[in-house]
Amino acid sequence: MSKQLLFLINPIAGGKSKTRIPGLIREHLDASKFDYRYRFTEYVGHARELAKEAIEQGVDMVVAVGGDGTINEVASALVGSSASMAIVPMGSGNGLATALGISLHPAKAIQQLNTCSAHLVDSASINGHPIFNVSGMGFDAEISALFAKETDRGLWGYIKNTLSAIIKYQPQEYTLELNGETFQRTAFMITLANSSQFGNNAHISPEASITDGLLDICVVKPFPLYKFPLLAYRLFSRTAHKSSFIEIYKSTETTITRSQEGPVHLDGEPIVLGTKLHIVLHPASLYLMY
């Protein structure tokens, strides 16, 4: 019996045209294994709504065609269900897809659906908001808020925002409660890593795993601006965990308190949250195809 698939295509993710996706699906998806349909999303939150409807209709698999934000919407609807999620990465960073070895070429990613299998993976939440890849607060959340307003949604747009903001950004004070300890840190940013990388092969926590039942809490300490190229090298060489400016803790539940409310990014999508952030790891909560 053929499996029922729904492709949810975000037309604006990554600033890339998606008009050829339906044709690529027809060409590369194994019609002997799958019956499929597709929908283009029309607004923020639409992918989540459509994925929920798909579960109610008995769809076996929902395929997120877009970036980490699209994946977050689809996955948040599928957590705890028997339906599985697959990814055709077409965002600006594609962090989770890259970490899982999913091709960044749409035709190849669709071909991979013919042979991939379902794995139970972890998810997490911040004050009840689901997260699946890499999220956080501090500098990268500020950049995500700036990047969300950009018309250039590619890597260059991200680099441009980073370089313009890093000169004037001020580190913040945080209190962390995890693993039975409470301690204070002045941090440039704090990243919550379920997988290893932001995207574009920038690995903030190279040893993070989406199946280990733990969330990596990465505290990036203040650093001299002239050290920024070295930190960037650490990210792209998968050695961030060896940097003296980065502390990594593994935890299933963490509370972070900061002095003022501000942006937090959920898999790259910015949202304003308050001063107290409760972070919980939900082990083996999502079926993911890779």
Image (cartoon, helix red, strand yellow):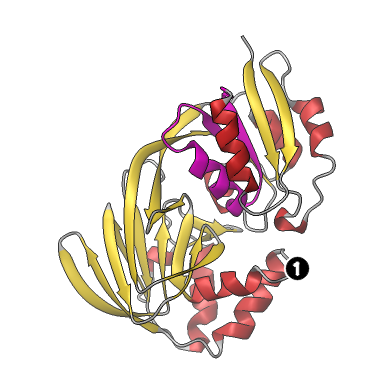
The magenta segment is 58-85
Q: Residue, x 59% and y 84% (percent of image)?
A: 165
Residue 114 visible? The answer is no
Q: Is 201 placed above or below 271 here?
A: above
- Name the residue rendered at 27%, 55% in the picture: 253
Q: Which residue is mark 1?
A: 152
Residue 252 horizontal/vertical position (percent): 27, 52
Q: Amino acid at mark 1?
A: Asp
Residue 15 in view here: yes
The quarter of the picture where the N terminus appears is top right
Which residue occupies the foreground of this view, 59 or 213? 59
Q: Is residue 249 magenta?
A: no
> Which residue does the image show at 64% across and 51% down from the upper left?
67
> Left or right: where does residue 26 sit relative to residue 248?
right
Q: Is residue 60 magenta?
A: yes
* Quadrant of the drawing holding the C terminus: top right
